[in-house]
Image (cartoon, grey):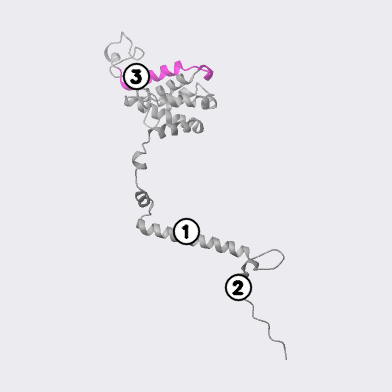
Amino acid sequence: EPGCVSPLVVPPDATGEDAVPAAGLCARRFAYALLQIIPSKIEDVDPEQLSSVLLAAHHPGITAAIPPGSARQVWLAASRRMPTLVKVFPGFAPAVSQALNGPKGLASSLPAEQTAARQALSTCIAISPNALMPHVLEKLAQLLDRTEHDALPEESLEIFATPEGHLASEWKALQEVSEAVMVVERRNVRKAKGRFKSGGRAFEEDDDDDEPPPPPPPPAA
């Protein structure tokens, strides 16, 4: 946090430049410390600890030492200490998602913690998208406010759905005509199929529509 310097980064007896280390040096020392405290077996890690590691590994205070575009290098180094993480992550997904969306993650008032949570979520989705995405989408659905959308009149929705270059009224009429034509075509197809019957005789169902046969010729005198 601002104004707080850990003894891990700055020894209590440090003087001169060592007492005020550069941001990059602080980040490297924090990253090194993080790697040292990660258990070597995933079985020794619970969801809360994994969430903390994810947030720490993506925190700007640590990734500041990483060149731009390589911010996940700290996490990659951390994950190598847990080689079976990908296999067991689906079981961790609900708790990890809740933690990353919680007060120390996206719900935090500190921009750095929010950034860490966003980066961590992106990493988790890459690890196991099928396990995490349902929880992410559920959370996003809770954040969406559909009040204004649901209050829109039907006319506004029709205008929005109208292709560019068309008037909504003309487009709606064109769609209605197209639907009517399709209905007629489907009826004609069914009618044509019904004219044929087994046994080799044709047009049985269409007898009422045909003209009556001509009368037989009169008998020869």
Give whichever of 212, 183 is nearer the camera: 212
> Three-letter amino acid code at disc 1?
Glu
The answer to the question of whether label 3 and label 2 lie on touching residues, with beta carbons closer than 8 A, is no
Q: Residue at x 37, y 59 (%)?
A: 170
Asked whether, in this view, residue 111 is left or right of residue 136, the answer is: left
> Three-letter amino acid code at disc 2?
Asp
Residue 64 in sight: no
Give whichever of 42, 136 is nearer the camera: 136
Which quadrant holds the N terminus?
top left
Image disc number at residue 179: 1
Residue where numbered disc 2 is placed: 210
Q: Tell which tag, 3 or 2, sits nearer the viewer.
A: 2
Residue 160 vertical position relative to residue 55 in the rendered view, above or below = below
> Three-letter amino acid code at disc 3?
Cys
**Is residue 34 shown in magenta?**
yes
Q: Dot 1: within a 10 Å radius of its alpha carbon, few (fewer than 14), some, or many (20 or more) residues?
A: few
Residue 207 in sight: yes
Looking at the image, the residue that sits furthest to the top is 13
Q: Dot 3: within a 10 Å radius of its alpha carbon, few (fewer than 14), some, or many (20 or more) residues?
A: many
Q: Earlier in the sequence, mark 2 or mark 1?
A: 1
How many numbered discs sit on the rendered protein? 3
Asked whether, in this view, residue 74 is left or right of residue 89, the answer is: left
Give whichever of 169, 23 is nearer the camera: 169
- Residue extent of the magenta highlight: 21-44
Image disc number at residue 26: 3
